[in-house]
Image: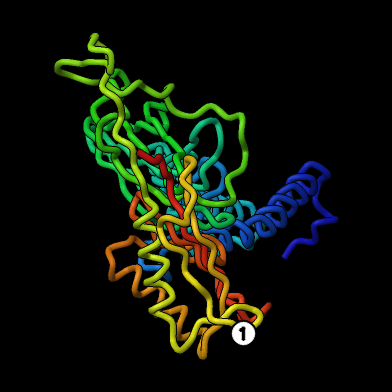
Amino acid sequence: MTDAWTLPLSDRRVIFARRLIAVVAATLFLPAAAIAVAVMLVPARSNGMQQVIIGSLPGEVLATRSVVASILILTVLVIAVPAPRWWLLLLVPLRVAGITASLLGGVGVGLTDDSATPIVADGCETGYVVSERAFLFAASGQVLRMDGVIGSRVASTTVDDGHKPFVDRSYLAVADGDTVRVWHTVEGVGEPLDTSSEPAFVLPRLSDQTGCGLAGGEPRAAPQTSGPTFDPDGGEGPPPSAPHDTREQVARMAALTVESSVGTAVDAAGAPIRVPSADELSCDGTTGVELVFATDDNEASYAAILGAWTAAGYASDRAMQEDIRYDGTVRLSARDRTTIDGMLHLQLGGACQAP
């Protein structure tokens, strides 16, 4: 091998530049490959129910870009690394393969236009994002509940003609009581939205809503009515809305909660807890019951309580260390704090308007 110091200065500069490029490429390759592996492991381990979301980039985009970046960096490394002539038998095919893979990867990145959009209700982030994908006339979306950078799938969207309603902000989200109701357009941005219709999906309202003062979907549309209208004085006008009293349901589910416990449910002083009746509950827009108690076996009681709510037809969810059961009207927020204070903490509530 020729001593580099005996070469002309211009050749030495070329060799130095190639070595520097090779060192930089080798340094960048490891983190790029690590990011690709880490992002792809999340859906693999959760059977596709979870993915990494960073900003507006969903996991598929992050994985694709990281893989392409890794291939491109590796190609640069193979091209830049100085080597004896006989190594060219190996390096030339590798260089051609790397360049081809990089070009194909670039096309793949161009075709991957997945995007993640936070659902904003009344100007505040709800803790949910929608990952949307469109290709030609096909489109789909996944609704994800965020815990840090990990999104867990809780619902999906159905649209036509490659439409991405959340990217286009052609949706409505209303945080009301313990739920977030969401409507979105199906065929295009110009499609009218009306909150008097059934929402596309209903989500449990999370307790850690942040980031207010944001722009979300379209301004809330006023409910539409049809047919004759009237007012109490006999003139025409909109019919009065029917009051919704959830006190009976809350009291019934509170009783079921205690009855599902293992053994006797007692308060911090050791006295059996008492469940209030519906008549004892307030109804001033909301109503609710807070139950804090211990049982003979808190772990078994906690599982039995959640199972009883599920068996009663309530949907299940989990946010941070809080278990949630909800049906769009009444919501249970449950936490097992046995290791902290020896008690189970449960809150039941819902919107309430007395007749």
* Residue 328 position within the rendered picture, expressed as x and y whole percent measured from the top left: 35, 49
The quarter holding residue 251 reads bottom left
Q: Is residue 96 visible?
A: no
Identify the secondary structure beneath mark 1: loop
Picture coordinates of residue 23 (x, y %)?
72, 57
Q: Amino acid at mark 1?
A: Gly
Q: In the figure, 135 relative to 306: above or below?
A: above
Image-based side of 298 in relation to 184, left or right: right
Which image quarter is the C terminus in?
A: top left
Q: Residue furthest top?
A: 235
Occupied quadrant, residue 312: bottom left
Query: Can see residue 120?
Result: yes
Question: How many numbered marks appear?
Answer: 1
Q: Residue at x 66, y 54 (%)?
A: 25
Q: Does residue 278 lie above or below 273 as drawn? A: above
- Disc 1 marks which residue? 270
The answer to whether 294 appears left or right of 168 in the picture is right
